Amino acid sequence: MILDIINLKSTIYNLQLIMASKPSIPKGTRDFSPAEVAKRQYIMQIIKSNFEKFGFQPIETPSFENSETLMGKYGEEGDRLIFKILNSGDYLAKANAAHLESKDSTKLTSSISEKALRYDLTVPFARYVVQHQNDIEFPFKRYQIQPVWRADRPQKGRFREFFQCDADVVGSKSLWQEVELVQLYDMVFTDLGLKGATIKINNRKILSGIAEVIGASDKLIDFTVALDKLDKIGEDGVKKEMIEKGISEEAITKVQPLFNFTGSISEKIEKLSQLLASSEEGMKGVEELRFICDNTMNLGLSTAVLDLDVTLARGLNYYTGAIFEVAPPKEVAMGSIGGGGRYDDLTGIFGLKNMSGVGISFGLDRIYLVVEELNLFPKTVTATTKALFINYGDNEAFYAMKAIQQLRTSGIKVELYPDNAKVAKQFQHADRRNIPYAVIIGENEMASGSFALKNLETGDQLSLDFEGLKKALL
Amino acid sequence: MILDIINLKSTIYNLQLIMASKPSIPKGTRDFSPAEVAKRQYIMQIIKSNFEKFGFQPIETPSFENSETLMGKYGEEGDRLIFKILNSGDYLAKANAAHLESKDSTKLTSSISEKALRYDLTVPFARYVVQHQNDIEFPFKRYQIQPVWRADRPQKGRFREFFQCDADVVGSKSLWQEVELVQLYDMVFTDLGLKGATIKINNRKILSGIAEVIGASDKLIDFTVALDKLDKIGEDGVKKEMIEKGISEEAITKVQPLFNFTGSISEKIEKLSQLLASSEEGMKGVEELRFICDNTMNLGLSTAVLDLDVTLARGLNYYTGAIFEVAPPKEVAMGSIGGGGRYDDLTGIFGLKNMSGVGISFGLDRIYLVVEELNLFPKTVTATTKALFINYGDNEAFYAMKAIQQLRTSGIKVELYPDNAKVAKQFQHADRRNIPYAVIIGENEMASGSFALKNLETGDQLSLDFEGLKKALL
C-alpha cells in the first residue's frame, strides 16, 4: 500500500515533468490545423473574390510599424494594448536614465522600443495612402487581409492575434460607395450560404441630430445604450434608465417616436425626418440615409436584410457619416460579424487633409463560427488527397510513382505511402486521413500495366488501365 | 541676393519639415502595392497548389511564440536576431533588479520579454508536431506559407520581414520523399515558366566521408569552400587555398578525383563510390544519393536539371542526409532560390525523439525577382477591373448600377466611377488604372435599354444590349 502511494506519487511527478516540458503557445494565440486552415481560406477566398469584383485592389503593409505611426491613434486604452517590440542589441544604452531609475514602465517604453505590431489595418492604410500619395490614383479602393495584434485579455472568441478583412475607398464622398458596400456584404454572405444576415445602418449625423433635439450631446451614448434595451426592458424601463442618466423628461418626450420606431426603412426615415426637422445636421443625415437606403432597396439585395437602427453608435469618435454593423442570421446567437462606416478625415492624422474614406470590415473568426454552426462549409473544402498508392516495395513504388507523376501533372492530388510498411497500417493511414481511394499494385498489375483502384468507403475494387484510373480520380 | 538665400533657406527648412512629417515604415520592411501583391500571390498560389498535389496540408502557427520555444535554437547569432516583444503593462515591476542595475541588456531581456516573433517556420513546426502529436497522423506532410522576422542588417534582397514557403514530411525515413521533393521543385518551377533551374543535391554523409578521407573533419567547411572556387581560380588556386587552410598535400592527393568531378550524375556517383570506399558513413551517403538520383532520373524531370554538387554544405549543423539547393536558370545572376534537406531529429529539441524529417523551402522574394527579370508574369496576373461605368449623374448611375450588380453576380469585375465628375477626368482614371473598357450611358441608352461599350485601347465603340455587354466583358 505504501509502495503503491510512492509509485503513484512518482507517476504524478513524472506526469508533471512531461506536462511542464510539453511546448505551448502564448495565451490568446492559436495554431491552425489543416482542416481549420482550409476552412479559413475558403471564407477568405470568397471575401477576396468579391472585393475584387467590386474593384478593390489588395495591398499589404508590414506587421510592425514605427511606434509613432501607431501610438496616440487608438486612445489611451489602445496605446496600452499595442504590442511593442524591444529594440535589438544593447537597448539599455539608449534607455532614458530617469525613467529607468524611477522604474516607470510606461515612460521608459519609447526609449527602448521603436517599433510596434499593428493594432488594426486602418491606421496602416492611412499611413500607406499618405506615404504613397503620388503613386496612387484616387479614388483608391483597397482591400487588405492581414493579421493584427492586441494585448487584450483573451476570452472566448477574442484573441491576441487575429485577421482583419477590410475594404475601404478613399478620395470620394459619393454615397454610391455606401450603396456598394451594402451590396458587397450581401454578396459575400450570399456566397457563404449565410441567408438572412442583417445589415444595420445608421448615420453619425442622425445621432448628432438626436443629441441636438434632446439638448445633451454629452448624454448621447447613455441615450443610445438605454434605447438599445427597448426589446429587453420595455419603454418604461428605458425611460427610467434615461432619467437616471440625467436626460430630462422633456427631452424624452421630444423623441417619443423613437420608442415606437417600427415599419419599413422608408417609414423609419420619414419618422426621423419629422423628428429631426429642427436640426440641420440631423436633416443632412436623413438625406444621406434616404439616398443609400432607397437606392439599395430599389436595386435589391439577394439574401441580406437592410435595417435602420438608430441605436447603432459604433465608432462614434471617428465615423462622420454612415455607420454599419452586421448581425448574423437570427438562428445564431452571436455578436456582430462585420462593421464599418465613413470617416471624413482618414489621412489627416498623417498630414494629408480632405481625404474622405468609407469602408467595411469582415469579422473572420466570428463568420467562421457562424458558418460552422450552420454547417455551411462545403465538404470539398477539407478534401485533400484523392488516392493513396499502397507501397509494396521499391519496384512497385517505382511503378506507382510513374502513374503518380502523371496524375499530379493533370492536377490530381495523389500520394505514395512512403514506406513498405504492413498493408493494414497503410490502409489505416488512408482511413485516418479520410483519403477516399487506395491504389494497389502487385505483380499482376505490373505485368499487365494496370491498377487496382479500391473505393475505401464501399470496399469496391476495379482493375483499370492508366486512362481509366485517371478518369476515376479526376 | 541675400533675400534669395534667405528664401532658399526657408524653402529647405519647409521641405525638411514636410519630409520629417511624412510617415515611413521601419527599415527592412516593405509595403506591397496592388500589382506587387498580385504577383506575389500568383507565385504563392502555384507553390500552394503543387504542395497540395503532393499531399502536403497547410498549417498556420502564431506570429509570436513563447521565448523559450525559440531561444537557443538558432545559435548565439540567431538569438540576437530574434525580435523580442516587450511584456505588456508594468513590465519593470518584474524586471531583474541586478540586470537592470548593471544595465545588462542581454541578461535583462528574459525578465521583461516573454514572447518573440518567429525566426523561421521549422522550429514552430517542430513545436507544433510535439504539442499536437496525439492528433497528428504520421507520416505528416505539412506546408506552411507565413512571414518570419529577423533583426538582420537590411540590404539588397534581405529583409527584416519576409515570407517562407516550406514543405516538410515528418515521421518517415523513406528516400522516396527526397525523390518527390525534387519532383516538387521541378513542377513548381515548370508551372512558373522558369526553365532550366538547377536542383543541386548532396548528402551530409558524403561530406562526412570526405572529412574522413582527408583526415580532418574540422577542416570540412574550409575544404568545400575552397573546392567551390574551382571554376573561378582553377585547380592550382584551390589547392593553394587548401594548403593555406592547413589541409595536407597527402589528403588533397587522396581526393584528386574531386578536381575533375564531371560527367553524368551516375558517373559522379561512381567516382564518389571509389573515393569513399574506406568510409562506412560515406558509402551510406553514396547509396542514398544513388537511390534518389537514379529514381529521379528514371522518372524524368520536366524542365529542371538535377546535379550532384559535393561542395554543397548548406545547413551542415542540422542536416543529416540529403542536402538540396536550387540555382535559378543560368541567364539570371542570383543566389539560390530554394533549399532544404533531411534532419534525423527534428522534434528532439522539444522532447519527441526519433522523428526524422525532410523538407524544402522556396525563396519567394528571389523567385519573384527571377520571374520579373525573365518577364514571366502572365499579363492576366495584374489585370483588375474590366470596365469602368462613366457617371453622368444619379439617374444614369442607377441604371449603371443595375447592370453592374448583374455583371458582378456573373463574376465580372466592373466599377462605377463614384462621382459625377468631368468626363475627361473619369476616362483618365480608367486609363491610369489600365481598365480596358468604359461603359457610357446617356439618355439614348436609358431610353433604349442599351449600353455604349468603348474599347479604350482602340477607341472602338459598340452599342449593345445587356446580354451583349456581358458577353463582351466575360
Image (cartoon, coloured by chain):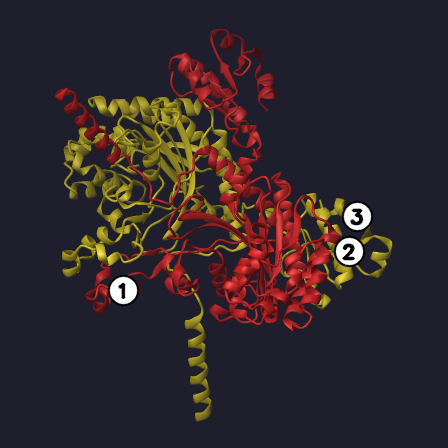
Chain colours: A yellow, B red
Residue B26 figure quarter: top left
Quarter of the picture containing the N terminus of chain B is: top left
Q: Amino acid at mark 1?
A: Leu
Q: Chain of mark 3?
A: A
Name the foreground residue: B3 vs B301: B3
Q: CA distance from mark 2 to mark 1?
A: 59 Å
Compared across the picture, whether A413 is left or right of B247 comes to right
In front: label 2 or label 1: 1
Quarter of the picture containing the C terminus of chain B is: top right
Query: Residue at label 2?
Result: A399
The residue positioned 48% from the left and 54% from the top of the image is: A32
Name the foreground residue: A378 vs A245: A378
In front: label 2 or label 3: 2
In the rendered image, the residue lying farthest to the bottom is A2
Residue B10 figure quarter: top left
The residue positioned 54% from the left and 43% from the top of the image is: B44
Name the foreground residue: B206 vs B199: B206
Q: Are marks 2 and 3 on the same chain?
A: yes
Measured as percent of width and height from the top left, residue A413 is found at 66, 49
Query: Residue at label 1?
Result: B108
The residue positioned 42% from the left and 25% from the top of the image is: A296
Q: Chain of mark 2?
A: A
Name the foreground residue: B94 vs A321: B94
Query: Residue at label 3?
Result: A466
